[in-house]
Amino acid sequence: MATWQCIKQCGACCYLAPDERPDLEDYLTADELQQYLSLVESDGWCRNFDRQTRECRIYDDRPAFCRVDAEEYERRYGIDRQDLNEFAIECCREHIDDIYGDRSLERLKFDRAVGIPRILRPR
């Protein structure tokens, strides 16, 4: 069984372009939406994403909406705890594919890290 985990130096989730996330108002409070929008640079990337290291500069203090946490996902998105693993894996794969491509090194590293069988990986 595949198990979700974040991989270092990916950052696909740090691409925050609001026009690519039209349902932000559905799961962010007004204050969170304001905070979210304040993080977005003109090119769509989070201002806290270090492009050299490809890591978050405020990882330990990042907003709740940037965290993959069972309670957070249940409250915010209505995802049951038992479904979080599968949901988070699919979300990450989508973000990685959108940003880097489904044949990228980031996608390969993620699939390996979470334990997705090679047969299900793109060739």
Image (tube, rainbow, N blue to C red):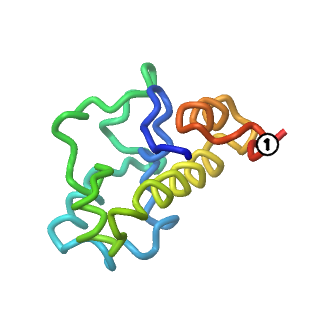
Front residue (pair 64, 48) = 64
- Tell me the quarter of the picture where residue 121 sits: top right
Q: Residue furthest top?
A: 53
- Say if 67 sits above or below 17 in the image: above
- Say if 79 sits above or below 57 in the image: below
Q: Amino acid at mark 1?
A: Ile
| Residue drawn at 55 percent across, 45 percent down | 2
Q: How many marks?
A: 1
Front residue (pair 78, 63) = 78
Where is residue 3 shown, x and y percent of the image? 48, 43
| Residue drawn at 53 percent across, 38 percent down | 114
Quadrant where the C terminus sits is top right
Front residue (pair 24, 73) = 73
| Residue drawn at 28 percent across, 68 percent down | 74
Where is residue 62 shown, x and y percent of the image? 21, 43
Where is residue 42 shown, x and y percent of the image? 43, 50
Identify the secondary structure beneath mark 1. helix
Name the residue carrying label 1. 119
Where is residue 48 shown, x and y percent of the image? 30, 36
Q: Residues within 10 Å of mark 1 (few under 14, many from 20)?
A: few
Q: Residue furthest front?
A: 1
- Say if 122 sits above or below 78 in the image: above
Q: Residue furthest bottom?
A: 26
Residue 122 is left or right of residue 21, and the answer is right
- Tell me the quarter of the picture where residue 82 sits: bottom left
